[in-house]
Image (cartoon, rainbow, N blue to C red):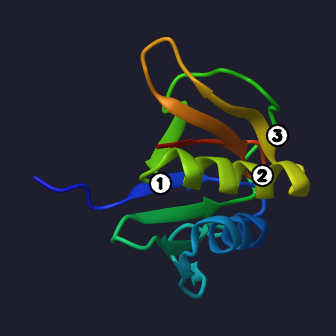
Amino acid sequence: MKLAHIALWTRDLDAAATFWQTYFGATVDESYRSQRRPGFVSRFAALPGGVQIELMTGPWIEAVPDAERPGWDHLALSLGSAEAVNALAARCRHAGCLVSGPRTTGDGFYEAVLAMPDGTRIEITA
């Protein structure tokens, strides 16, 4: 079995696409606009290594900052080393999208937490 893709709702599709391109080197497809669901627009972001993220938006997506709700909480991406985590965390601190700096968690992960422009959290791990 193989993960086909992960889908994330966002209020700002272009900002989300730029985030994935800027910080993770993603290649982002052109927008797809659904003919059967008016207002639905998506773009696929392909990460190096083959993981694909479908970025989706629609006028029904509400802003609920920092709300915990049912569903996936975050996506964790392994960057392969503590040095890579530190480097990306430093870039994101400068850009204002670092939520929490690099640390070793109680369960042994070396990680930092970033936020997409709409607040969706992304963990980066060693």
Circles 3 and 2: CB distance less than 8 Å?
Answer: no
Mark 3 element type: loop
In three-dimensional space, the C-alpha distance between marks 2 and 1, rounded to whole angstroms, equals 14 Å
At horizontal 55% and vertical 67% (from top left) the residue drawn is 37
Badge 3, how many Cα within 10 Å: few under 14, some, many 20+?
few
Q: Position of residue 56 (x, y in %)?
A: 59, 62
Q: Which residue is mark 3?
A: 63
Give whichever of discs 2 and 1 has the lower sequence position.
Answer: 1
What's the residue type where badge 2 is placed? Ala
Classify 40 as above or below 96: below
Left or right: 44 as drawn, with respect to 118: left
Seen at 76% across and 42% down, the residue is 119
Q: Position of residue 38 (x, y in %)?
A: 63, 70
> Which of these two is toward me, 99 or 55?
99
Residue 18 at x, y percent in the picture: 73, 73
Q: Amino acid at mark 3?
A: Ala
Task: Give the residue pinned by disc 1.
Answer: 79
Label 2's element?
Answer: helix
Q: Residue 124 falls in which quadrant of the image?
A: top right
Outermost bottom residue:
30
Name the residue beneath numbered marker 2: 90
Of callouts 1 and 3, the N-terminal one:
3
- The spot of residue 46 in percent (x, y) is 45, 74
The residue lying furthest to the front in this view is 83
Placement of 94 over or under 121, stated as above or below: below
Observer-nearest residue: 75 or 94? 94
Mark 2, Cα crowd under 10 Å, few <14 / some 14-19 / many 20+, is some
State which tag comes first along the sequence, 3 or 2.
3
The structure residue drawn at horizontal position 67% and vertical position 56%, both measured from the top left corner, is 88
Disc 1 residue type? Leu
Mark 1–mark 3 Cα distance, whole angstroms, equals 30 Å
